[in-house]
Image (cartoon, coloured by chain):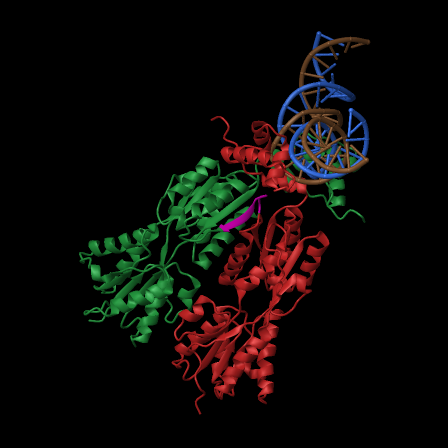
Chain colours: A red, B green, C blue, D brown
Amino acid sequence: MKRSSQPTINDVARIAGVSKKTVSRVINQSPLLNGDTRKRVEEVIAELGYVPNPQARALALRRNFLIGLIHDNPNAQMVLNVQQGMLEVLRDTEFELIVHPVNRGSPTMLEDIGQFLERQRPFGVMILPPISENDQLAALCAQLGVRYVRMGSAPLDEVAHMVASNDREAVRGAVEHLIESGHRRIGLVLGPHGFRSAAERQKGYEEALERAGLPIQRTLIVQGDYKFESGMRAAEQLLDLAPRPTAVFASNDEMAAGVLHVARQRGLNVPQDLSIIGFDDTPIASHLWPPLTTVRWPIATMARAAALKLVGGEGGGPAGEDGEASLFVSTLIRRASVAAAQG
Amino acid sequence: MKRSSQPTINDVARIAGVSKKTVSRVINQSPLLNGDTRKRVEEVIAELGYVPNPQARALALRRNFLIGLIHDNPNAQMVLNVQQGMLEVLRDTEFELIVHPVNRGSPTMLEDIGQFLERQRPFGVMILPPISENDQLAALCAQLGVRYVRMGSAPLDEVAHMVASNDREAVRGAVEHLIESGHRRIGLVLGPHGFRSAAERQKGYEEALERAGLPIQRTLIVQGDYKFESGMRAAEQLLDLAPRPTAVFASNDEMAAGVLHVARQRGLNVPQDLSIIGFDDTPIASHLWPPLTTVRWPIATMARAAALKLVGGEGGGPAGEDGEASLFVSTLIRRASVAAAQG
DNA sequence: GCCGTCTATGACACCGGTATCAAGCAAAGA
DNA sequence: TCTTTGCTTGATACCGGTGTCATAGACGGC
């Protein structure tokens, strides 16, 4: 029992009385093998509990089996959903997922990622929003020869390099739902400046108003940053307005929770006095009181599709083109935070 | 520009007019190098943008630089906090984090993980609760020669192999806080059966009652499973009791949110009619209305400590023994979901 | 019975690093 | 001047796989 290290291909070859190459052929399911030899080798492999060394394989093949996940995302639930979706696909392949979060706004962020890419040379990377909107990063991947897929709120890149949801239409639908309920003064809590998702959601809001012939009032549009506290600040501002808005669309659930929080503090009833709609359908949406009407986008499905694009037919995965969809539709989840407008 | 592949150590050696080994010495900061040679090699490295191939290194060194994160944890925020904490430590080293979630309750779970460990042979793994409580898994790691650290609600293993919080004491403190506020009928929503954390939190609850000379009533203790819905079901049951409990300790925030939800549905005021305390201090705790009094445990700090144990002095990290703490204290965060008992 | 073809397997180099050990060379000592 | 010592550097083997090409034997056609 001296050898604590695992057996190598040489051990298998020696014991089975064949060459390394033959063992390699067995492992790689080469078709031109005599049945007897294969069987013998397979027995030895099973007996020794031999497992090929991925590092050696990677070296010889001049490629590896790592998929990177790059994000600067504050939303834990989303990141985890993505991981889960990707791993569902990767589980059946020989790929492993290696995560690489970066600090939002760090000036060395791009260099950080560059270092990571150069060091590991992952086979492919998935890039989550908001950093997925950074075209320099995509260019960097392309330049280094690393496959990439960007996730976004709108088509950001060629089909092969992106999965996107239709935030604009989804928000338009949500705001139309408010309008249909009789609301005319509808507040909007924006996402942070410079975020594509924020811009798309704003456009959706404006489109809905325009189609209904309602004016777009700047006082009803308040800047937020996707955080709870900014939702609270925005709500303070909106609820201070002279004719108070009767409904608010917040660009994510966390800010919607902030709005709800302030409404509570002010003794307003939700939804009777104020209707609220959020975006993301994070768990918090269904846990709040009242449960929040919100927009759900199919994160895990998108993540699976992205993973399929990345490993695309390689690594034994289903080579089908089925998973290659790139545009995904979000849907409005109606709960209890919207009521008909009063008066 | 034909060569799209990155330069290798051979290129550097050839161009600098030295041997591979000398370049290797420069990379590894070997002390016995002539200043001139080193400088020349460093220039060539910089010029070519040479980056050593980690796979080749791993092969030659007969070890790799991967740290695995194994979890079957449903709490996204916690998993992400752990990732973040570990990466803070790993960032300064040459280690990479590779995540491996497993399906709770899958019968092949242990085999899954075994396969992962054998295939990748990570340098070390971090194991999150609840699967960290599985001694077979720890034994498997030990047997395969993979370093491991288990995170738990109580000391699970030797100091070198665990980081733990003091759930029992923390819960005792929380329940004592309720008792001091005059509560006598205090409900407990348990965590799922078989979870160490659930058991520890129950013990904390019982200890608090015992110390205060209060009886432990089985009707006040209701099974949950750490999910929102189970919190709701538990609340239904507790609030149906004839002398209604005036306070509830839920073993995590999500279930506490469920309790709050049901209280709302029944028109009870929280905290006037019912005080609630949760556990974890997830974001939801501060976002709920009223903001939830809860127990916060230092996840990121524990994760950092665990990462330090795993890479322990290797890989250029701070070799200090400072990070080697193993027991971490949780603290009660007092918000607005607890009030003095009425009557 | 000879030759060409096809099949199953092996010998060997190679991927890009590191370890071992020897060798070159300068400074120091005899 | 010759040897000893110490410091720098290089030649070579190796880590554990895969690719290329050669080779041995079976088989069919003439």
Pick the front one: B167 or A306: A306
Residue B308 visible in the current orientation: no
Q: Is residue B98 magenta?
A: yes
Which residue is at the front of the view, B114 or B251?
B114
Residue A212, picture quadrant = bottom right
Seen at 26% across and 66% down, the residue is B247
Is residue A102 covered in magenta?
no
Determine whether A278 is above or below B305 in the image: below
Location of residue A270 in the rendering, given as x and y in whole percent from the top left corner: 41, 80
- Measuring 60% from the left and 38% from the top, which residue is drawn there? A26
Q: Position of residue A329 (x, y in %)?
A: 56, 71
Q: Nearer the viewer, residue A19 or A254?
A: A19
Location of residue B51 with respect to B168 vertically, above or below: above
Residue B105 visible (yes or no): yes
Residue B167 rendering spot, x and y as whole percentages:
34, 52
Q: Could you tell me which residue is drawn at 59 percent across and 61 percent down?
A: A305
Tell me where the magenta segment starts and ends, as one range: B92-100
Residue B290 in percent (x, y) is at 36, 71
